[in-house]
Image (cartoon, rainbow, N blue to C red):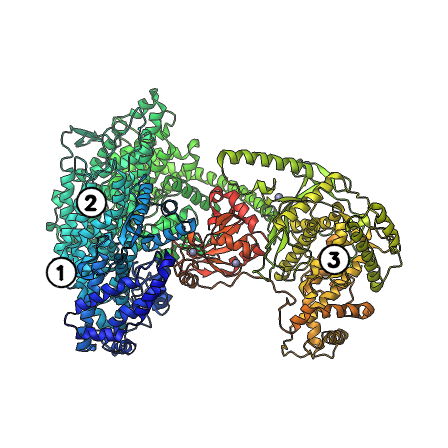
Amino acid sequence: MASELEPEVQAIDRSLLECSAEEIAGKWLQATDLTREVYQHLAHYVPKIYCRGPNPFPQKEDMLAQHVLLGPMEWYLCGEDPAFGFPKLEQANKPSHLCGRVFKVGEPTYSCRDCAVDPTCVLCMECFLGSIHRDHRYRMTTSGGGGFCDCGDTEAWKEGPYCQKHELNTSEIEEEEDPLVHLSEDVIARTYNIFAITFRYAVEILTWEKESELPADLEMVEKSDTYYCMLFNDEVHTYEQVIYTLQKAVNCTQKEAIGFATTVDRDGRRSVRYGDFQYCEQAKSVIVRNTSRQTKPLKVQVMHSSIVAHQNFGLKLLSWLGSIIGYSDGLRRILCQVGLQEGPDGENSSLVDRLMLSDSKLWKGARSVYHQLFMSSLLMDLKYKKLFAVRFAKNYERLQSDYVTDDHDREFSVADLSVQIFTVPSLARMLITEENLMSIIIKTFMDHLRHRDAQGRFQFERYTALQAFKFRRVQSLILDLKYVLISKPTEWSDELRQKFLEGFDAFLELLKCMQGMDPITRQVGQHIEMEPEWEAAFTLQMKLTHVISMMQDWCASDEKVLIEAYKKCLAVLMQCHGGYTDGEQPITLSICGHSVETIRYCVSQEKVSIHLPVSRLLAGLHVLLSKSEVAYKFPELLPLSELSPPMLIEHPLRCLVLCAQVHAGMWRRNGFSLVNQIYYYHNVKCRREMFDKDVVMLQTGVSMMDPNHFLMIMLSRFELYQIFSTPDYGKRFSSEITHKDVVQQNNTLIEEMLYLIIMLVGERFSPGVGQVNATDEIKREIIHQLSIKPMAHSELVKSLPEDENKETGMESVIEAVAHFKKPGLTGRGMYELKPECAKEFNLYFYHFSRAEQSKAEEAQRKLKRQNREDTALPPPVLPPFCPLFASLVNILQSDVMLCIMGTILQWAVEHNGYAWSESMLQRVLHLIGMALQEEKQHLENVTEEHVVTFTFTQKISKPGEAPKNSPSILAMLETLQNAPYLEVHKDMIRWILKTFNAVKKMRESSPTSPVAETEGTIMEESSRDKDKAERKRKAEIARLRREKIMAQMSEMQRHFIDENKELFQQTLELDASTSAVLDHSPVASDMTLTALGPAQTQVPEQRQFVTCILCQEEQEVKVESRAMVLAAFVQRSTVLSKNRSKFIQDPEKYDPLFMHPDLSCGTHTSSCGHIMHAHCWQRYFDSVQAKEQRRQQRLRLHTSYDVENGEFLCPLCECLSNTVIPLLLPPRNIFNKLNFSDQPNLTQWIRTISQQIKALQFLRKEESTPNNASTKNSENVDELQLPEGFRPDFRPKIPYSESIKEMLTTFGTATYKVGLKVHPNEEDPRVPIMCWGSCAYTIQSIERILSDEDKPLFGPLPCRLDDCLRSLTRFAAAHWTVASVSVVQGHFCKLFASLVPNDSHEELPCILDIDMFHLLVGLVLAFPALQCQDFSGISLGTGDLHIFHLVTMAHIIQILLTSCTEENGMDQENPPCEEESAVLALYKTLHQYTGSALKEIPSGWHLWRSVRAGIMPFLKCSALFFHYLNGVPSPPDIQVPGTSHFEHLCSYLSLPNNLICLFQENSEIMNSLIESWCRNSEVKRYLEGERDAIRYPRESNKLINLPEDYSSLINQASNFSCPKSGGDKSRAPTLCLVCGSLLCSQSYCCQTELEGEDVGACTAHTYSCGSGVGIFLRVRECQVLFLAGKTKGCFYSPPYLDDYGETDQGLRRGNPLHLCKERFKKIQKLWHQHSVTEEIGHAQEANQTLVGIDWQHL
Ligand SMILES: [Zn+2]
Ligand SMILES: [Zn+2]
Ligand SMILES: [Zn+2]
Ligand SMILES: [Zn+2]
Ligand SMILES: [Zn+2]
Ligand SMILES: [Zn+2]
Ligand SMILES: [Zn+2]
């Protein structure tokens, strides 16, 4: 179909291109009916440009639209060529002071915590960097898209509203100047015309609802009937559903379906089929049918193509308008006028109104286009912003209702613009006074929550899914209310008062519907059947918390408002509970001669509710009255007389009793919903407007009534009245065989009640309750949090309540109460409580949970013990109450209180007779302590004329009156002091008695002391004092002795830990200083050690005994014994790669024999160093395998290791492993024959070897020639002149036991399988190559790590590394014994031929393309296969030495050929040394052989320096290699850090210090070899600059450089768009830390197929960049991601820390983040050490949820 259309489309193009914008505009200027002209033009051309086929061509359409449609409009507007017209407009324009930049998704935004009026005020990065706020406390977030920069908005910032760029020019006065004055009349008129027409056109067509009919004035004469089947976005169906449905409905591939789905998700709609009506209709019905099963079907419309065309152009027009008004404020003003002008239909007929009101009917793409236009026009113009705000407020109810039923997220709704309008303080206030916005919002909200119970309260029980959905949406209205209230008025007008109070009324109505909602009744007998719905009510409460607080703040700012609000609130509360006594029997309670009337009510039997927002609001207002002193100034204005304290306290008290009963286990059968509610009631998110206010309300009540009455009511509500009112009730109670549970229950209730009294008296840190300020309050919170344990900043923030600006106020006080301890390499920075603050610790702090309380108690007692203090935790000294609450303290000395205390003490004294608890006693002691502190305070602050009425000390000294005749409280305390069963409380009792005496002394010296005490008691006490003092002295001595012993013991413990630190540390860390026991052999330090060659230092054979970690049996490592193996992990690696674009294309055909010097893909082996018997390991592995298979069948779960791939965890340390390496003795010693004295020199040796090779090749050819009978074959052998002593048919005997041989094959095959990613095949000739390669690569990577860290080559290596290298080298050396001799010989011949040319090998790499160390390892390890057949007397050692020398020389030539010729300007100081002239001579030879292509180098000094530097890594690797191969100990010099050790290395490796001597000594053969190397065409090409080559030394690879400031990374990522879906912003931009690529992760658009599976961009990238292993930074999340293969991954903590030493994974807190270099180095080290996979393994073992993540989709 598309191809048929093609020619037609082109024809149209021509006619379109011939249009002249200027001519059309000219015609328009003449027109009498401009609207008609323009509409005709559009009617004719739009369908010719847009929607010409099944797929849009955006570029072509845009080009044509600009030319034919927009061009004429621009000409018309300017009256001239817009290329001149627009710049003129721009020049005349006064630049705006508003930035207004609209944020892209993911763009960083900044808010200043010091200056932003509210947290919604944000800056773009550019403005932020140019503002004063960059030095303030700021917060950084990533934008979700939408919203704009507030730079320049003076209402948004308390200070510094402008950045440098938008700074006011001081000469200009920013006035409400009409921007139109800068425009000429003509331009104004024309702009007005064209804007009016185009804007109306766009609005009309976008809101057009007919599917196949155009508006009359756009209807065309000739109309082609093509249609689109248009699929719309919804938030109900998933991507997968849509993709699946589309494949079925329109018969497309999965890829196309994904494309459609992606566009639908992004733009809100996409045509999925193009053609005639029937054709489209058919697709529609399939889609609808397929998606209607579960929910409502996907929205699909069959639309006429010309409608779609006009709509597309309508959108284009809106964007065009947005960009045109950017030229001039004047144009913008005109557009605003046009938009807001009322149409002919009156109310709501302006274009802006029409758009807003059809918002929910528009698709996503259309919405976001016009929202952006609103933001850049209406919201940028100060005058029209107001007018628009009014329109918005007038339509508010409709818009919100539309939004509630719309299924798009709020960010796509016009309702979301509320944040831009309501947060502007002047607008908010205007809308409140003029549009009554507060009431509107609240009423709209209430309208949407219609579900009520019989009492008119909200009811969420039996909520339908739809209602729940609606409820979620309606919550955004609360957010709007918050925005309106966010800035408190500084001045009140009468209108504002009136409207605010009207709003307050509405708010009270709302709270009234919540007062008492979700009531519960205690379940007895049976457990509840269904957990009742409770979350909705709490969500509501939680969302309203800040609003309630803000309402109070508003009230507090004006006395008149406060008084009125108080009255209103009280009135509503009385409506709610006025009749609380109705129908209840009044009862009378009496204790100690006091009596009170109350009702009979039991929390445990009747309905009770946690939701009491009206009571709590009243409590809040009451505190404000107290604080502002209104109550004392205008008591006549207050309804204080109407207050009924028993009514006030009733419901809060019930709620607190409910908590106590739940705690006492009385509500167990009510299930978890109740437990959760109680939890949230106390939780930091809710408590401020729940629990805290209930305590305040009780405090209010007590301060207004007789405390005795209060206590009796309280006892009654706690259902404890009987116990305390009846003398000896307790005794009877326990002696009866009461149910144990009931005793326990009552004890808990008593404890809870005492706790509540402690809180009522002690909690006076809210300003208004006590004489404190807000800082004191927050300080106290922090002190108590830190009393539990030291905390990180974020932890502390989480435990503190946040205000509506998300501030806790912590920063202002933290310095005063805590020390900051910086974090180390891991962990976080911590705040520790300053010791001097410990005295403010209150054990019964009301915000402690039970667990926190006991932790804090323990911590504080421990601290005291450490300081050698007594362990009493007495109540702290408290600030005085505010006058309104002052009488509250009398509760402590009230008769009922004393009775309660006395009773409990009595129980404790007669401890066996009663059911009592230590907690109970502890609380009583605390209360007594509080009373004593109180009295002390009173006495200290007493003034002459006042009498201290607080006489607690006197009251507790009095014994009980007849008939009880109980001893005084004081006497009982003294008795208890010596009670052996109260050891823990002794210090506290002692403290009480001490304080009692102090207070008594103060009182005696005080002039106002009333003389009430009787002689007798004084006498009694003085004698008692003496007694007491003596006892005390003895106790003190005993205590000191005890403490001394304790101190000694802990000292000893500390020593033990210090000395055995290593034991307590991770032994696996590479940098752990503990090392392998250095070489076992005792070597004299003055001996020269030689690692190889005939002169190799002979080491006495060491016997090695090892223990199997599985069976614990010890065994010696021997050739013929059972194999011992190390757990090992083989992986492919690109860590050393110098060319990441290279990877193995076809592993089946890949030839790994020569490693390229770019080291692009190596095989790395590591081990945890744990040793097992081979058979023990095999048994273990089989059982793991069997277990996993069962588990997978059952659970279909992944594990952290892939058994099918041979993976397992080390049975000891759980380190990820995939094979085992056998432990071997130095294999050379086994095959080394006698040492002959007469050994050939290099030249002779090369000749001999070449002959042997020739012979072998001849034989090989014979064998492979077909049709050769074996007889003939042997004839030929005879023909062949075999070199002397060479016996190619000889097969050496392999000394290894079967078990060792098996393990040699096992590890070899594993290396081959993993290294090449092929199926295991032990016969493959590449197996030995892979083994040698892994050995070489692993040594190279360790050499790199050591060099990078400046560690000595043979310094202390961790055991696991040492063991791994030794076993790996020895294994690689022994592997040939299980391979085919001829295969290994073949490899040797080929390797050898790369240096010593040979006719039969032609296609060998040139020496520039060979990694010499790999070559060396290959040659040395393959050599025995040849040497074993040589009986001419050449020893293995001689061969090693010559091979080594030969390769070293080749490497020197390599270095010289590639050496950098840069002169670094440093001149040599000394005359040339021997090496320098030698190297210069060699260079000259090279120069000659290369035909002078090599650059001249004047200085031998430079050359020698570069040779030395270039060859060092090779020498170091060789030293490691021969050390482990031959077991010669390392010279002590190389064991310590220091400079290069060049000479030591040379001597250890049997090399002359002047390496060039090697060439001179062997010039005979070397000259011809060098010549042959240089002749290679590749070398020529390189020298002529046609290709590149690796230079030496190779630099170590590093992870990419990260910026210091994290936000620049975010910014970089926000500019990154998905490479596959044309300019779309990527949702999860992810940075590869290895190569710096940015990827579009975790998204359908960038999935690719890898080995037959769809994988995300990251996984795909790891395969090319890191051969399966990847290290990424997820930029939006600030999270490091490790990936290995398709199934493994973990998150790792990012190297960015905030100022508090914490990471911010997920960027939730938004504190500025800075690079922590040490942590980044640690990640780099993990990478260098090849430990990423191991790290993932450990993380997944530790956290099983990581296993379930679909890592391959990232
Ligand atoms: Zn800005
Ligand atoms: Zn700015
Ligand atoms: Zn600031
Ligand atoms: Zn064993
Ligand atoms: Zn292990
Ligand atoms: Zn990469
Ligand atoms: Zn993408």
How much space separates mark 2 and mark 1, taking CA atoms?
32 Å
Please state the total of marks drawn on the protein image: 3
Instruction: Between label 2 and label 3, give the one nearer the viewer.
Output: 3
Q: Which residue, as the protein is rendered here, is positioned at the far top? A: 737
Please, what is the three-letter code of the amino acid marked with disc 1? Ser
Q: Is mark 2 within 8 Å of ligand 1?
A: no
Which numbered disc flags the more N-terminal residue, 2 or 1? 2
Q: In which image quadrant can residue 595 be found?
A: top left
Q: Residues within 10 Å of mark 2 (few under 14, many from 20)?
A: some
Q: Looking at the image, in which quadrant does ligand 4 appear? A: top right
Please indicate whether residue 1034 sits to the left or right of residue 1559 in the image: left
Residues marked 2 and 1 touching at CB (< 8 Å):
no
Q: In which image quadrant can residue 124 be found?
A: bottom left
Instruction: Between label 1 and label 3, give the one nearer the viewer.
Output: 3
Residue 371 appears in view: no
The numbered mark at residue 17 is: none
Eyeballing the image, is 1125 above or below 1567? Answer: above
Which numbered disc flags the more N-terminal residue, 1 or 3? 1
Residues marked 2 and 3 touching at CB (< 8 Å):
no
How much space separates mark 1 and mark 3, taking CA atoms?
98 Å
Please indicate whether residue 1646 sits to the left or right of residue 1584 in the image: left
How much space separates mark 2 and mark 3, taking CA atoms?
84 Å
Please, what is the three-letter code of the amino acid marked with disc 3? Lys
- Label 2 SS: helix
The numbered mark at residue 1390 is: 3
Q: Quadrant of the N terminus?
A: bottom left
Q: Residues within 10 Å of mark 3 (few under 14, many from 20)?
A: many
From the image, tell me which residue sits under label 2.
448
From the image, tell me which residue sits under label 1.
493
- Label 3 SS: helix
The one nearer the camera, 1580 or 1627, is 1580
Please indicate whether residue 1396 sits to the left or right of residue 494 in the image: right
